[in-house]
Image (cartoon, rainbow, N blue to C red):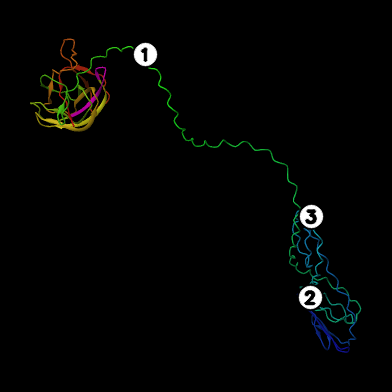
């Protein structure tokens, strides 16, 4: 700027801002409605005036881990102190950050009457420093401007080098013995050893006792024919409802049967339900059920009624079972009082009446293990058909 040029500085009080501007002709300081104009010639540019008063320094934050020194900004909020690592090398001092919100300093004019101190405006960004005018008399120190907003925290310094590996700790105690592993697979069977020599023949044992006389062997069976206990003659019997009649039968060889049958008498009338089956023998009496063939409905006189089965009986004694479970008007069936039992050992009652079978009362459903039985000599005939 030329030596004799005029400088105008205008100061305007507002609620939030004080503005200083430079012009070529005059300096105006305006307070409320009054105006003061000062005109002065400006001499040659003097040396740089002293910098304005430094704002008070904010409280020192706790010292963080020392990283490389970043650019110096306004002191940010110090984070919580981390664990102290090994002190790294001192980083180079970063460049000084720009001074916060100092307005451009105008030339000092003659000291006028002190106007009322205006409200401190928000500190604007640092403007370029104007040419220093001649140092005027020091005016009263203005009120300290509000501290500018805290600058952003500088970037975190680079992490220091990794510390040396610590010494290896002592060997830990040996752990408990682990569980025994699963049993390995069975090894292959070794080869058969050579057969040893034949031992000497032992002495002849004593001859055993003579066995009991067996049943006369069967002369053979014919498929499709019926088999039962031998009789010398037949008659008829009016059976009692819910009474099971057990007739003995000896099976001379293993046989498979496909039918079980009974026959109504010559005077039968009405409808009867008859259950048929076979029991095992125990001590000369019926015991457990060998099989229950179910029931057949009998409706005509002098008629053979059958139930289809598929049962195999090994050789031995059994009991044929006949039970009326719903009697006809005349509940008459073919029977016999003269069964021929083999071997020839006949059972009699106390009056020496021939007794060849048994009866059991109260049988209303499926056959079950025989209970209390009573002796009898007249039995309805039951037969099995060989398949």
Asked if residue 35 shows in the view, the reply is: no
Residue range (magenta):
274-285
Local secondary structure at mark 1: loop
Residue 248's quadrant in the figure?
A: top left
Percent position (x, y) of residue 373?
23, 18
Percent position (x, y) of residue 121?
77, 74
Local secondary structure at mark 2: loop
Q: Residue at x 80, y 79 (%)?
A: 128
Count neighbours of disc 3 (C-alpha within 10 A) and say few if under 14, some if 14 to 19, many if 20 or more.
few
Q: Is residue 103 above or below residue 341?
A: below
Percent position (x, y) of residue 116?
83, 75
Q: Quadrant of the N terminus?
A: bottom right
Tag on residue 86? 3
Q: Are marks 2 and 3 in contact (CB under 8 Å)?
A: no
Left of 213 or right of it: where is 190?
Answer: right
Q: Earlier in the sequence, mark 2 or mark 3?
A: 3
Q: Nearer the viewer, residue 370 or 175?
A: 175
Q: Nearer the viewer, residue 170 or 80?
A: 170
Q: Nearer the viewer, residue 343 or 289?
A: 343
Q: Quadrant of the C terminus?
A: top left
Q: Which residue is mark 1?
A: 203
Q: Which residue is mark 2?
A: 126
Left of 218 or right of it: where is 44?
Answer: right
Count neighbours of disc 2 (C-alpha within 10 A) and say few if under 14, some if 14 to 19, many if 20 or more.
few
Q: Main secondary structure of the magenta part?
A: strand
Query: In front: mark 3 or mark 1?
Result: 1
Q: Is residue 164 above or below residue 34?
A: above
């Amino acid at each position: 700027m030329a030596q004799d040029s005029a400088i105008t500085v205008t100061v305007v009080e507002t609620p939030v801002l004080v503005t200083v501007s430079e012009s070529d002709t005059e300096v105006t300081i305006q307070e409320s409605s009054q105006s003061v104009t000062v005109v002065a010639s400006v001499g040659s540019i003097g040396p740089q005036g002293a910098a304005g008063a430094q704002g008070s320094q904010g409280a020192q934050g706790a010292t963080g881990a020392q990283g490389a020194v970043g650019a110096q900004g306004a002191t940010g909020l110090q984070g919580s102190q981390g664990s102290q690592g090994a002190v790294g090398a001192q980083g180079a001092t970063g460049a000084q950050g720009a001074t916060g919100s100092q307005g451009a300093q105008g030339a000092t004019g003659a000291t006028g009457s002190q106007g009322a101190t205006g409200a401190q405006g928000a500190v604007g960004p640092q403007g370029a420093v104007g040419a220093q005018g001649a140092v005027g008399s020091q005016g009263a120190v203005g009120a300290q401007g509000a501290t500018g907003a805290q600058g952003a925290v500088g970037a975190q310094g680079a992490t220091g080098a990794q510390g040396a590996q610590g010494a290896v700790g002592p060997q830990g105690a040996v752990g408990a013995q682990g569980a025994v592993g699963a049993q390995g697979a069975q090894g292959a069977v070794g080869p058969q050893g050579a057969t040893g020599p034949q031992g000497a023949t032992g002495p002849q044992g004593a001859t055993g006792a003579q066995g009991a006389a067996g049943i006369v062997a069967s002369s053979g069976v014919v498929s499709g024919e019926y088999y039962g206990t031998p009789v010398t003659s037949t008659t008829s019997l009016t059976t009692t409802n819910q009474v099971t009649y057990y007739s003995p039968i000896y099976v001379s060889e293993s046989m498979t049967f496909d039918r079980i049958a009974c026959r109504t008498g010559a005077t039968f009338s009405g409808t009867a339900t008859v259950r048929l089956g076979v029991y095992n023998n125990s001590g000369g009496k019926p015991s457990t059920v060998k099989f229950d063939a179910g029931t057949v409905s009998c409706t005509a006189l002098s008629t053979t009624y059958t139930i289809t089965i598929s049962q195999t009986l090994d050789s031995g004694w059994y009991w044929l079972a006949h039970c009326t479970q719903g009697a006809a008007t005349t509940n008459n069936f073919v029977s016999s009082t003269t069964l021929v039992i083999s071997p020839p050992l006949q059972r009699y009652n106390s009056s020496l009446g021939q007794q060849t079978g048994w009866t059991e009362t109260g049988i209303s459903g499926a056959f079950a293990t025989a209970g209390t039985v009573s002796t009898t000599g007249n039995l309805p005939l039951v037969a099995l058909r060989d398949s």
